[in-house]
Amino acid sequence: MKEEQRLLLLHSSSLFFPPQGVKLSYGTAGFRADASILKSTVHRVGILAALRSLKTQSVVGLMITASHNKVTDNGVKIVDPSGGMLTQEWEPFADQLASAQTPEAFLSLITEFVEKEKIPLDGVQSAEILLGRDTRPSGESLLEAAKQGISSILGAIALDLGILTTPQLHWMVRARNKGMKATEPAYFEQISSSFRCLVDLIPNETKSSKMDNTVVVDGADGVGGEKLEVLKSMLTSLVIEVRNTGKGGGLLNDGVGADYVQKENVVPRGFCSNDVGL
């Protein structure tokens, strides 16, 4: 490892200390916790994402979200070049990296891992990480921590794509690595055109019968409702009504959302007895 790279990592890690006594584990959803204790973890996942990009010589993604969790939580996860989740083989290293208590221990971990994985950490190879986040208030500051982590790896570049759903970022990472246009309009166009193709496959005799083409969606006052408002205008054969879009003053996942309905066994806020049968 170059001396410049070593000093960059030492300096960067000294700015973000993991909370004492807190041990986080990387799983299917990445790391998740109260947003107030996540800056150090997100910073280190930024470094991990850059290492993954260097290892695979591909574009990878970093998503800041806690999905169905309450609004005060947040999380971070890496999207592999295929558009899938981070390979499980790297999860133990992610845990160790997040838990290292000193800059020296942190640097030692990276040095050992880079040698074992034969990652070219010399500044010659480039790395590119696409960043996305949901609408949580904590997302912006955590995004900055991720950017600082990425910039502490020589040759690594972070591209902020703004507020996205998690599937959008997964799709964009895969698209970039396949040489396709990886933009939000391109995502919406592929989803809507695929839907139109499916509708075209419906037999004519079925089409002629009376079909209910209306669907009502609980947007959980989050990013999903916001993006569906854009997509629904492109789905001409389907009428979508989005409730709890996030614009009516509701709080993300507070009395709304898939987890709330599943755990409480009640309808979400914004729905009532008049909606039975929809």
Image (tube, rainbow, N blue to C red):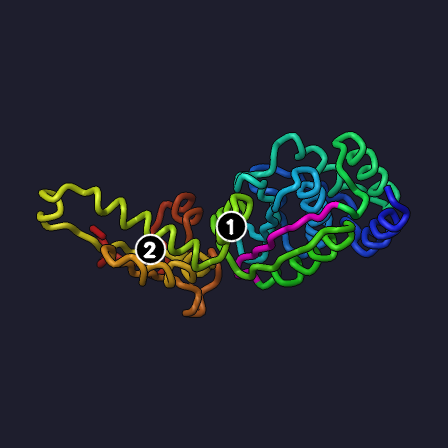
What amino acid is labelled 1 in the image? Answer: Met
> Which element is circle 2 on?
strand
Residue drawn at (80%, 51%), measured in percent from left and top? 17
Please identify, in this view, whether the residue under mark 1 or under mark 2 is nearer the observer: 1
Q: Which residue is mark 1?
A: 172
Question: Which class describes the residues within 10 Å of circle 1: few (<14), some (14-19), or many (20+)?
Answer: many
On the rendered structure, is 97 left or right of 236?
right
Left or right: where 206 falls relative to 221: left
Magenta segment boundaries in residue numbering: 125-136
* Residue at numbered disc 2: 217
Tell me the amino acid under the disc marked 2: Val
Q: Dot 2, crowdedness within 10 Å: few (<14), some or many (≥20)?
A: some
Return the x and y of residue 24 as percentages of the image width and height: 68, 41
Q: Residue at x 73, y 44 (%)?
A: 22
- Work out whether mark 1 precedes mark 2 in sequence or the reverse, and give the earlier one: 1
Q: Quadrant of residue 221?
A: bottom left
Q: Is residue 37 visible?
A: no
Q: Position of residue 74 (x, y in %)?
A: 60, 53
- Camera-side residue of 175 and 271: 175
Q: Is residue 240 visible?
A: yes
Residue 202 left/right relative to 160: left
Question: As displayed, is residue 274 above or below residue 111?
Answer: below
In the image, residue 13 lies in the stretch drawn in magenta = no
Report the residue at 36% width, 59% height from top.
231
Quarter of the image that includes the N terminus: top right
